[in-house]
Image: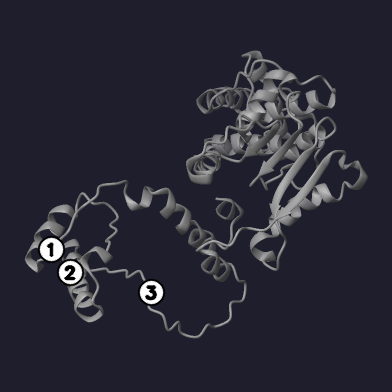
Amino acid sequence: MTYTNSLTLYPTAQRLAHAIDLMVNVKGGCALLAPGMMTMQAFERRLYGDLVGVYKPAGQFTRSIILSRVMTAHFGNKGAIPDASGGMSGAEKFPGFLDAMLGLFEQLGAGLVSPGEYEQIVGYAPSKEGDIGRLYAAYEKELLRHGVVDPAMARRQLVDALKQNAPIPFLEKYREIQLEDIYQFTPYRFELFRSIARRIPVRIVAPAPDSRREAFGFLTDNLAKFEELGSRAEKLEIEFDLDPEGPLADVKNRIFEMDPERQAENPQESPVAIIAGSSRYREMEEVGHALLSLKREKGYAWRDFIIVMRDIRPYAAIVEDVFRRYRIPFAMVKGVPLTQAPLAKAALSIFVAVDSGYAREDVLR
């Protein structure tokens, strides 16, 4: 049993659970106790509690109600909010306008843009920008009046508190912070870890750069922000790591090639056969024919075959009927549907990334 005084942060609870599984299974099932493991969200909440106070978030419904009231005051009674220009008058009636404004305010928070800073923006459409700025300011004022905060306010409060160099009891027991699989550094996260690195070493672990710029360009662009700090980076460093070669390494490398060369036909047969039919019953008949042919031509034993289905429930009776007619011995094991299996989701996620043109969210997932 080993204890560590390094705090490792992960982007999601699923990624944290995977890291714990790897540690539990290391060296034949020996458990490695590492209390310094948290998700990014839990870390931010803990910091907020130490530096700002009790975190009182306004839920999505609460934020919607508050902004709706602000919009009613703004567009329905221009005297309620000073200098209402009416540049966006009527827009509030369009479906999705309220959600769009909430999304915009959250993005402004990720950029650490306060209502006062937003009001200084001039350019494309001054009257519309003015309306949005006044909505933003009135919305935050209402949140504060109700004693709650939204993500944008919480982020600014946390970064401002860090810049005051107030003590953080939570971090005193750790000698360093390590970021695993966290590559999206908004202005908020950039300032967050830049400020933390003035107190405690921060290490960002990232995959080693390679030629796949189109697929992973956003990652190198994000890390470049820290590299450009130079001597101002304080105790922050970037560690590049090579992914271990695994059984899917060849497949992964080919999928993410930007200009893949045509490969000669693989003389080896694929160990996985994908069978489809016009109906479930027809699919099982095709499976039965394939099993009989392989056993006859290749000399396989029945135990050499496994059939994976999307969901065993609609197939169970069909399998029993078809396999008994074909005299194929079988046993059924019920598990989670294939589309919900973590391994299947992880394996298929690379195809989602390719299909979306390597969208940042899909590559991270």
- Crowd around label 3: few <14 · some 14–19 · many ≥20 (10 Å): few
**Amino acid type of the residue tagged 2 in the rendering:** Gly
Q: CA distance from mark 1 to mark 2?
A: 7 Å
Label 3 SS? loop
Q: CA distance from mark 3 to mark 2?
A: 18 Å
Instruction: Determine which residue is flagged by label 3.
Output: 270
**Amino acid type of the residue tagged 1 in the rendering:** Phe
Instruction: Determine which residue is flagged by label 1.
Output: 323
At which x and y percent is residue 70? Answer: 61, 24
- Crowd around label 1: few <14 · some 14–19 · many ≥20 (10 Å): some
At which x and y percent is residue 197? Answer: 81, 35
Q: Which numbered disc flags the more N-terminal residue, 3 or 2?
A: 3
Residue at position x 71%, y 19% from top?
A: 50
Q: Residue reaching furthest left? A: 325
User: Mark 1 near mark 2, Cβ–Cβ under 8 Å?
Assistant: yes
Q: How is the image coloured?
A: one colour
- Up-down: is 317 above or below 38? below
Instruction: Determine which residue is flagged by label 2.
Output: 288
Residue 123 seen in this snapshot: no
Residue at position x 53%, y 37% from top?
A: 13
